[in-house]
Amino acid sequence: MRVCIIGGSGHANFVFQGMDQDPSILVVGVAPGSEGEDVGKFLNAAQKRGQLPQYYEDYRKMLDELKPDIVAVNCHFGDHGKVNFEVLSRKMHLFAEKPLATAMEELTVLKREYDRSGAEVAAMFGLRYNPAFYTAWHAVREGKIGEVRLINAQKSYRLGSRPEFFKHRQSYGGTIPWVGSHAIDWVYWFSGQEFVSVMSHHSTMANRGLGSMEMTGLCHFRLTNEVFASVNIDYLRPSTAETHGDDRVRVAGTRGVIEVRHGRVYLISEEEQGTRELSLMETDGIFLDFARQVRGEGKCLVSAKDSFVVTEACLRAREAADKEEIVYF
């Protein structure tokens, strides 16, 4: 399985996690996807594993010469759409940082190219494979809380130091599509419903000189079957916190409630008294799962439809915050 990596700004480390499980995965080429981008950490990661991928200045030349099986794209977020298009136009399988695009027009073009390509696509919603979130989703799927009615999801990060491209909407894309995308994905994944409308707010207040980068965001989604969901997003987690992120989800159903907090899963249901902590289930990880799909050996937990639908939801939520009005799907 030959893989090329474009960009150095996202989570292509998923590729190396998959490689550690399956040595037949080989990184054969690495190139920047955005101007001035440093891809050294991925070259180093490959070399530490005894591989010697070729470095290219031009990712298009790399794709044309190396003809990889899978391309992992994780450049500056505002460039995702155009780089992903170059991959799909060559009918190559795409493992892409989320969101797939940061403009609705780009997403429309990308979806059209995907439909023509015959390629497999998965966005890097790797938190579906986190043991706590996977365990909670599995319990919901088994009917442990009955019919899902309400979801509350949270993404809270330390601010830390952010690169220059985060300061500009054109290159960053917005905090709702970047940080909020995981939580919006949980809403879609846990609910089993389709998005109907969204109302959102976001703010650049207290962003410590980071230009147009939003520090906080809040989204309210209406989904089919009158399921409602909220997503709260912030970069306000103190530097003294034990972990970089505080990821949570609460799913309320007709027969119980399940929550993910601090990497643990708690279930309250009609079946027994009190709160029960569930034993965590393990998964193989997103890239290995996607590689198996490309080989025809199964289905990735993140489908192409999921990837496109959640990207659209992120962009519609950002639009609702920009316009301060309800946006319909």
Image (spheres, rainbow, N blue to C red):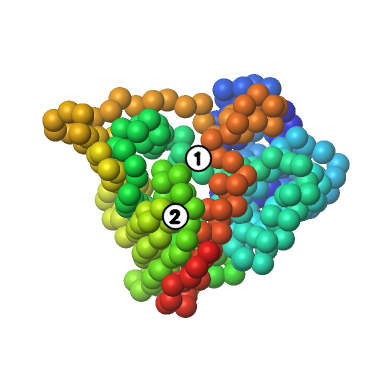
Residue visible at 34% across and 42% down in the picture: 147
| Residue 65 picture location, percent across and down | 86, 42
Q: Residue at x 60, y 52 (%)?
A: 308
Q: Which mark is residue 59?
A: none
- Mark pair 2, 1: CA separation: 25 Å
- Is residue 261 visible from the viewing direction of this image? no
Q: Residue furthest front?
A: 225
* Label annotation for residue 126: 1
Residue nearest the observer in this picture, 253 or 99 = 253
Quadrant, the N terminus: top right
257 horizontally vs 64: left or right: left
**Kind of element beneath mark 1:** helix
Q: Residue furthest left?
A: 273
- Camera sees residue 139: yes
Quarter of the image for residue 12 reads top right
Question: In the picture provided, is 153 more to the left or to the right than 223?
Answer: left
Q: Earlier in the sequence, mark 2 or mark 1?
A: 1
Mark 2 crowdedness (10 Å alpha carbons): few <14, some 14-19, many ≥20 = few
Quarter of the rendering containing residue 236: bottom left
Q: Which residue is mark 2?
A: 224
The location of residue 22, given as percent across then percent down, is: 61, 22
Dot 2 falls on a residue whose secondary structure is helix
- For badge 1, the amino acid type reads Gly
Q: Nearer the viewer, mark 2 or mark 1?
A: 2
The image position of residue 274, as x and y in percent, is 14, 33
- Amino acid type of the residue that numbered disc 2 sits on in the rendered structure: Thr
